[in-house]
Image (spheres, grey):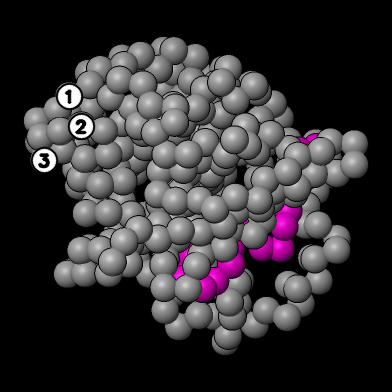
């Protein structure tokens, strides 16, 4: 097994399908848990030294923190809608309750400042259409430095139509500098099923001579790839199977910045991109829930 590729449920613990902590990943900041609740399920946890988001993947919930109660409309699945979310601070007690049941991502980052708990409405999540042609994808920038205040945590969702590549050209963010920030990154994947069975995608990560890393893996729903350093991309969606991934990033920099450096061998492809050539299937989702098509 590749130690950077964590198959679905390989890190399961109690109510969590997925558990990635700074300790388990061997780094300092980024974490992710996927909480699964049945009907009228409830779970209480301590955030400790990490700011955390409650992000519905499926289902709706309420979140209680610091004496406030937040109601999340959530979504049927990650392809049906851009979701609302809640930010909860470090050193807090949080209770998540779901009347209908569901799965909830808890991206986190070790941090110093304690910010107030806040609700993030789906309608205010900026939806960016990035790339062109078969490198077209949708980015839901719900917790990026320009869109939502946090101390360390950076998180976004990427949805890639079947047959397209995202996280391309390959890029890295493992050194601090004028044009690059040092950020640990987690990729959590879900793949839309086909009419007969589950779908799949492919993830590539590769290193530099002085910092080797190698990932070339088929990924499926629930899989995680952890990226401590190195060039990452593409994330390739197989034809017929739309691809979703949640990115979770954090690092030691004093400034919360998402700065990347393209692999110079492949960065030239950006010069071929033209807005008029965006994949017409995009956007695949918005703040308005899609009707029908339960598989998506």
* Position of residue 147 measured from the top left corner of the image (x, y, whole percent): 49, 48
Q: Point out the tag, 1 or 3, that comes first from the N-terminus.
A: 1
Horizontal and vertical percent position of residue 148: 47, 43
The percent position of residue 9, horizontal first and vertical second, equals 39, 33
Task: Identify the secondary structure beneath mark 1.
Answer: strand
Which quadrant is home to the C terminus? bottom left
Which numbered circle lies on residue 37? 2
Dot 1: within a 10 Å radius of its alpha carbon, few (fewer than 14), some, or many (20 or more) residues? some
Tag 3 or tag 2, which sits nearer the N-term?
2
Estimate the spatial distance between the alpha carbons at disc 2 and disc 3, rounded to whole Å. 9 Å
Local packing at callout 2 (Cα closer than 10 Å; few below 14, some 14-19, many 20+) is many
Q: Give me the C-alpha separation between circle 2 and circle 1.
A: 7 Å
Q: Of callouts 2 and 1, which one flags the residue occurring earlier in the amino acid sequence?
A: 2
Label the magenta part by its dominant secondary structure.
loop
- Magenta stretch containing residue 296, yes or no? no
Asked whether the residues under the numbered discs 2 and 1 touch, taking CB atoms below 8 Å apart as contact, a structural biologist would say yes
Q: Which residue position holds label 1?
A: 42
Closer to the camera, 60 or 101? Answer: 101
Residue at image position (20%, 32%) is 37
Residue annotated with mark 3: 100
Stretch of the chain drawn in magenta: 159-175
In the displayed structure, would residue 20 be above or below residue 200? above
Residue 117 appears in view = no
Question: Marks 1/3: CA distance?
Answer: 11 Å
Q: Is residue 287 left or right of residue 165?
A: left
The answer to whether residue 74 is seen in the rendering is yes
Who's the residue at 30% across and 20% down the image?
14
């Amino acid at each position: 097994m590749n130690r950077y590729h964590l198959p679905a449920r390989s890190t399961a613990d109690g109510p969590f399908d997925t558990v990635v902590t700074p300790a388990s990943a061997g780094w300092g900041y980024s974490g992710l848990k996927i909480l699964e609740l049945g009907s009228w399920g409830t779970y209480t946890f301590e955030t400790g030294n990490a700011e955390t988001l409650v992000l519905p993947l499926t289902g709706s919930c309420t979140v209680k923190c610091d004496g406030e109660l937040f109601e999340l409309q959530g979504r049927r699945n990650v392809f049906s809608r851009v979701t609302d979310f809640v930010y909860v601070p470090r050193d807090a007690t949080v209770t998540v309750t779901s009347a209908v049941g569901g799965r909830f991502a808890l991206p986190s980052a070790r941090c110093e400042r304690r910010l107030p708990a806040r609700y993030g409405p789906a309608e205010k999540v900026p939806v960016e259409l990035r790339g062109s042609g078969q490198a077209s994808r949708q980015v839901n920038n719900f917790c990026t430095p320009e869109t939502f205040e946090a101390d360390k945590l950076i998180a976004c969702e990427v949805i890639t139509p079947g047959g397209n590549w995202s996280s391309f050209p390959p890029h890295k963010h493992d050194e601090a500098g004028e044009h690059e920030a040092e950020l640990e990154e987690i990729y959590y994947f879900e793949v839309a099923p086909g009419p007969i069975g589950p779908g799949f995608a492919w993830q590539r990560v590769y290193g530099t001579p002085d910092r080797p890393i190698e990932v070339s893996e088929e990924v499926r729903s629930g899989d995680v790839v952890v990226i401590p350093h190195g060039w990452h991309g593409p994330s390739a969606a197989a034809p017929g199977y739309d691809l979703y991934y949640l990115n979770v990033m954090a690092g030691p920099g004093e400034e919360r910045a998402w700065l990347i450096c393209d692999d110079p061998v492949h960065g030239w492809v950006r010069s071929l991109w033209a807005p008029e050539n965006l994949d017409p299937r995009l956007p695949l989702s918005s703040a308005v829930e899609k009707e029908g098509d339960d598989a998506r």
